[in-house]
Image: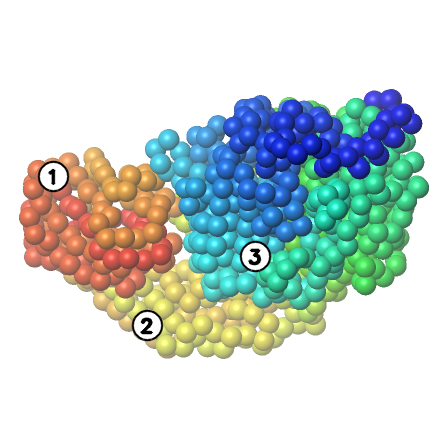
Amino acid sequence: MIKKVLSAVSVIAMATSLLTAFSGAAGAASIGDANTTIFGPNVYVFDPTMAATDIESVATNIFNTQETNQFGTQRYAMLFKPGTYNVNIREGFYTHIGGLGQNPGDVNITGGLNVDAKWANGNATQNFWRSIENLKVTPSSGKMRWAVSQAAPMRRLQVQGNLELFDFDSNFNAGWASGGYMADSIISNKITPASQQQWFNRNDQYASWGGSVWNTVMVGDTTPPAATFPDPPYTIVDSTPVVREKPYLYINSSGQYSVFVPSLRTNAKGVSWASGSTPGTSISIDQFYIARPETATAASINSALSQGKHLLFVPGIFHLNDTIRITNANTVVLGIGMPTLIPDNGKIAMSVSDVDGVNISGILFDAGPSNSPSLLEVGPTGSSLNHSSNPTSLQDLFFRVGGAGAGLADTDLKINSNNVIGDHFWIWRADHGTGTGWAVNVSNYGLVVNGNNVTIYGLFVEHHNKYQTLWNGNGGRTYFYQSEIPYDVPNQSSWMSKNGTENGYPSYKVADTVTTHEAWGLGVYSFFRDAAVKLNNAIEVPNVTGVKVHHMTDIWLSGMAGSEITHIINDTGGRVYANSPSAAMRQTVAEFQGSGTGDTQPPSVPANLTATAVSSSQINLSWTASTDNVGVSGYDIYRNGTLAGSSTSNSYSDTGLTTSTTYSYTVKAKDAAGNASAASNTASAVTQAAGGTVLDRTGWTATTSPVNSTPASMLDGNTTTRWTTGTDMVPGQYFIVDMNASKTFNKLTIDCTGNNNDYARGYQVFVSSDGTNWGSAIATGTGTAPLITVNFASKTARYIKVVQTANATNWWSVREFNVYNG
């Protein structure tokens, strides 16, 4: 802990600087003045009269330090006074970029402001701990890139162009990204998430949204895409029930620094600044204690708080020998530049009394070497006051146990007060870095909620030793949940809940005593790296009518053979245990509601079942969806009277069938309580006859235009991989398959299922013996469904070329390409 405190002289000098910060001589400002403000040397305040090359040089030097600095100690903020800046900036770890205007449009970056993943060859799954807020970006390229995963919020952003949420690798494949957050922002054109595995939007506006991988939740967006869970897996909530936007630093009309605290919003749709400035209250900077790492201590911070001061942390590492205690109502605690609080001696890093209207945002809590009971505690144990008219708000708070060094915390975040609003948390027990191991960086619980009527938006919780989230209070609401359960469980016996009787600890656990709770868009993922471990339920909630969960997804990322998540929720939902077939990697449950005294009402009977043979070995089924008093959880498909499979949607593909054979089907709907409907009508189909033998694809290769993703994915027999154009469909896109030798064939199939809107809207098929001379098209057609079958007179050739001939806003992608002989 740093012992030095502020002297009287430094306080006077700091106060004087408040009055003179913007009263310099006319003319161009010097770049040397950028980091000589009241906020210390790691905060750069840029003026539009500064030379663009100088600003860009500073930003580049910071990025070069921070690009790969995942667990370093450097922290930075770059703030822009109102004006226009023709600069190109790349943002790295532990960096905050913000505009100092009242509204986002007051600061305009006209070159570019991007987060890429070049340091990891396009893989953005570790692009953490950075932020951007309160400015406008008018990218000269027409698009902005924000390739991030957890703890990288975008707030109050205006982009005049397109926004891409991923990066490409060196072969122009879309590299993975794993979860991001955007709120209160306007994107003038299209947002393309591409390989973003999960994403959370709140109160945003955009021209269009371009797809989803596993879990995308949008709350209060102006014009979101239609709800289509589970494919694409959108969860759409029309309005945000209650929220307070994050406070932000700005320059007021008198030219002085202030902090703006937005007002509470209820039933909100769209951005807070759509019709002018965001409603709220401005607090002069002289009402804040500015905590700088070279001077601030727990004692000096608590002294200022006891005098009624607000608190602003600047970038840096703050080692604490005592708890920071927030005891006054309406206290604002704001961090810029990812300030990091570390309790050195096992105490709670920060606590909040059971008072109204506290606001804490923009801070990283890092566990110290001695075990802390919690890192942030909101309200003492037993808190009981009603704060519904002026709730405490928590925004962009991140928690870490291990990674930067050994750390211990029983619980990272504990919420005891009622009516608290949480808006974007990443609560992480480190799976990599230093100081990691099952018995090294121990943290039993990520989040524990004891207060009633707590609402959380954008909840990311990962890798804790027991429950990732334990919710004990009534009236809780969660909008978006992303959780990876621990990677490093050493054996099954080390990870058993319910007094050692059940495999693993559910990630999202609502206590048995809770009577009301609701959650939307929950994703739980497993990678049992070190042992063949099983988790019985990803989610566990009381079986009472007041508990509802909408749209759940389980994913088996990877792991030891024999590992699995057995059920999604309360012993309902199929298991995930492998990467192939696709059903082994991903399972979903659309709706769950507790049955209380017992739900005995079955769903309605599925209607209008149809069966269509699409090949010699596959029949596709579809039917009209059933309804239920609580919710339909899925459908069982019966082939010739025997259970053949199940589906969570109103369609199913039955594969592996015998050629020229008649099959009859019925379907039954089921709900979460196990009630099943009567059987649907019977539908029959005959698999296709001769000409349906699939050619052996050994040695086949593919080339594509545009060059994107991996062309071999359409020939590998793995339905979890696919080739994609990586851009909207336009005429002239194509792929060429070299069959390695001359073949005779009369049919081909282009399988685009999985991303069911990515099929070619129009196509032409050409063949060639030399790969150069193609002649006229042998087949031309219009795509109408994700599985396209093309029949033609028997041909003999080595090369096949398929050209996409239409326009569509979807990407063209192919999961499998097969050719059949005659």
Precedes in sequence: disc 2 or disc 1: 2
Left or right of residue 344: residue 435 = left
Q: Bin the neighbour count of mark 2 within 10 Å (Cα to Cα): few under 14, some 14-19, many 20 and up.
A: some
List the single residue furthest toward the front: 26
The spot of residue 567 in percent (x, y) is: 56, 53
Query: Of helix, strand and loop, which one carries label 2?
Result: strand
In the displayed structure, 713 sits above or below 553; it is above
Report the amino acid beneath label 2: Thr
Q: Bin the neighbour count of mark 3 within 10 Å (Cα to Cα): few under 14, some 14-19, many 20 and up.
A: many
Report the amino acid beneath label 3: Asp
Q: Bin the neighbour count of mark 1 within 10 Å (Cα to Cα): few under 14, some 14-19, many 20 and up.
A: some
The residue sitting at 87% across, 42% down in the picture is 309
Screen quadrant of the N terminus = top right
The spot of residue 428 in percent (x, y) is: 66, 38
- Looking at this view, is 581 or 179 the one in front? 179
Report the amino acid beneath label 1: Gly
CA–CA distance between discs 2 and 3? Answer: 40 Å
Q: Which residue is mark 1?
A: 771
Left or right of residue 113: residue 519 = right
In the displayed structure, 663 sits above or below 20; it is below
Q: Which residue is mark 2?
A: 610
Q: Which residue is mark 3?
A: 204
